[in-house]
Image: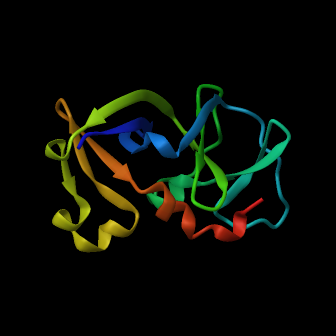
Amino acid sequence: MPNHYLIFTIEEQSYGIRLFAVEKVIRAAELISLPEGPDALLGLINLSGKSVPVVNIRRYFQLPDREMELSDKIVICRTETYTAAFIADNVEGVVLLSPDDMDRADQIFPEMEYYIEGVGRINSRTVVICDIHRLFSANEKLQS
C-alpha cells in the first residue's frame, strides 16, 4: 500500500517523513532561547499561543550545526505524546511511495531501523525515510 511522505532537504540530502505526522510547515521564525537547555533543543517557537520545542535534527544525522537562514522551513510534527519541530533547509513537497519504491532499513543495515524506516527512490534520487516518532522519542523530556 503506498504512503504519502513530506520530502525535505538538509545539506542537499533528501529525507522524508510520513505525511500524517506533519502538522504544518512554516517559514523560518525567531526561536525563543532557553538558557541551559538540552543540546538537542534549539529553542521554542510560539505556535498559536502554544510553545513548541524545536529539535536540532542535524545532530541526529551527524551534520554540522549552522545558523538558521531566512529561506529555511520549520516542520512541525505530532508524535504520539507531543508536538515538536525541526528546521529543514528546504521542503520539496509531498510524494507517494509504494513499498516497491523503498528498501526497508532492516534490509540495509539492521541497526538503522530505530530512526530510519528505509531508503526510498524518487526518480534517480535517494531519499532517507525517517521514523519521526522514534526520532523524537529520545526527547520526551522536551514536552511542553
Side of 38 where 48 appears, left or right: right
Task: Look at the picture and state if 76 lies above or below 83.
Answer: above
Front one among 124 and 23: 23
> Which is nearer the eye, 106 or 78?
78
In the current view of this chain or complex, which residue is farthest to the bottom? 111
Image coords of residue 29 (percent x, y): 73, 33
Residue depicted at 65% across the width and 38% down the height: 68
- The answer to which image quadrant residue 24 occupies is top right
Which quadrant of the rendered structure holds the N terminus? top left
Residue 63: image location, x then y, percent:
47, 54
Q: How many marks?
A: 0
Quarter of the image that includes the C terminus: bottom right
The residue that appears at 81% across and 67% down in the rendered structure is: 36
Residue 15 position within the rendered picture, expressed as x and y whole percent measured from the top left: 38, 43
Report the side of 106 relative to 94 (left or right). Answer: left
The image shows residue 94 at horizontal and vertical percentages of 39, 29
Tell me the residue at 56%/70% (across/down): 138
State the residue lying farthest toward the front: 1
